[in-house]
Amino acid sequence: MRNERSDFASKLGMVLATAGSAVGLGNIWRFPVEAGNNGGAAFIIIYILCVLALGIPLTVAEFVVGRAAHTNTAQAYKRLGGNRFWRQTGKLGVMTGWFIMSYYIVVAGWTLAYFFKAASMTPSSAEQAAALADNGYWERYFGAFIAHPLLPIACMAVFVLMSHFVIVRGVEKGIERFSKVLMPLLFIILIALVACSFFTEGAAAGLAFLFKPDFSKVTLRMVLAAMGQAFFSMSIGMGCLCTYASYFGRETNLLRTALHVGMIDTLVAIMSGIVIFPAVFSTGIRPDAGASLVFIALPNVFQEAFSALPWLGYAVSVLFYALLVLATLTSVISLHEVPTAYLTEDFHLSRRAATTVVTIVVITLGTLCSLSIGPLKGLALFGRNLFDLFDWTSSQILLPLGGALITFFAAWILDRSILRRELTNDGTLPYGHARLIVALLRYFAPFVIFLILISGLGLL
Ligand code: PFF
């Protein structure tokens, strides 16, 4: 039974929106940091293998469930699986969405603040001169910014309102239309930044770090880190891909779409590495500077890497933070859609009301997360501040758990005829390649996800 709901109107819009969900902070912020911490090129090779062997099959599994059910994630499992346990699985996906969004929007707010800050720091400004003369400048700035009682929360709220503005317009007029503008803009900026990075002094060293593999760095921990990164980066393990797939048309080739999304996502991650590492090597910062890389090391790095051409350094810096804002926005939009679709369909709220409820709830949770690393540092549960708790719970537990359940459901519970029908578009596509995906889902993915889970819990 197919209910009345708006779908993506074009193939391009559908791929761009789904790739928009995947491309986010995970690509530009987390990927280079993970690569830096895990030996550069060797990590990238392992990461690509993880995308192929795990990321693509799981994306396909979520697509199958979403399109076959043609409803929000919580309902999808109920409709296809029937029993009470699987109904809860769908709800777990929606809950994971709230969790991730609550801390993700805090960092999203930082990207917006840094974009405006970068734009205000022209080469002729006194503040720029002070920042360049003082190595500790950005560390102090970042510390003061996140400790401010209002500023990070205001930036976060503005960011969520931008997403609200898109989501409230619906799938075709909101998500699809905006993705068709935001994603091409993102690619143009990224290509321009990659081109500039070849002209930095550290280009050769940075590129060698990224592309010369040192396999002595490969350990089980590193492989698991690459898998966890693939999960997060491809938006796997919660309701996002499933919800978007419920808006796919019957003629969409699910396998091909998953491949396109995986390719775009990986390409953006690697290109971000090409932007970041040559600049980092030009200024002598350690490539494993950690999560602070983007907000503490990079603001000065671009200016220093192009010190002979200060206005180019300025432009690169502003464009880099614009890139972060765009990538983050398309991911926040996809996170916003999951609970909105759930509230609209399961609680019969209008789209406007559902979007507003989600906006208010996540701004409230995000405010608590933000305060827990700023003015309310004591706000902790189980020994972690709320921000870290939300991050850890969602990326180490909820996403792998969701991924495990989705895999098991698609490979073992779902009626084989539905799986086959979705993978072959009612018998119009050959089943050949899909066989490999199904085999990976049945015999490989559950084992590997189990390893990720126990490693996340510190048991490995
Ligand atoms: N894939 C996004 C990123 O790489 O930043 C993060 C994300 C978005 C995770 C949506 C999960 C999700 F459902």
Image (cartoon, helix red, strand yellow):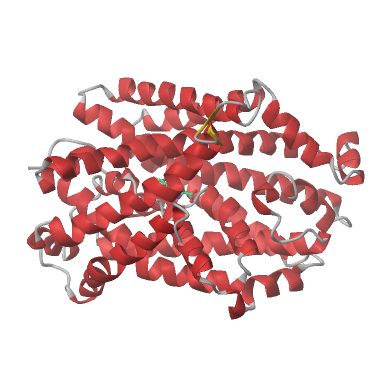
Q: Is residue 67 above or below residue 284?
A: above
Is 139 positioned to the left or the right of 328 in the image? right
Is 438 positioned to the left or the right of 282 in the image? left
| Residue lying at 69% horizontally and 24% vertically, measured from the top left | 148
Residue 337 is situated, as x and y percent measured from the top left of the image, at 35, 36
Q: Is residue 251 visible?
A: no
Is 260 positioned to the left or the right of 279 in the image? left
Q: Is residue 378 above or below residue 270?
A: above
- Could you say which is closer to the camera, residue 127 or residue 151? 151
| Residue lying at 23% horizontally and 46% vertically, measured from the top left | 246
| Residue lying at 51% horizontally and 64% vertically, measured from the top left | 267
Q: Residue furthest front?
A: 459
Is 336 positioned to the left or the right of 378 in the image? left
**Quarter of the N terminus within the rendering:** top left
| Residue lying at 89% horizontally and 57% vertically, measured from the top left | 308
Residue 147 is situated, as x and y percent measured from the top left of the image, at 69, 27
Residue 121 is situated, as x and y percent measured from the top left of the image, at 80, 38
Q: Is residue 42 above or below residue 383?
A: below
Residue 270 is situated, as x and y percent measured from the top left of the image, at 57, 64
- Could you say which is closer to the camera, residue 458 or residue 159? 458
- Could you say which is closer to the camera, residue 11 or residue 326? 326
Q: Is residue 153 visible?
A: yes
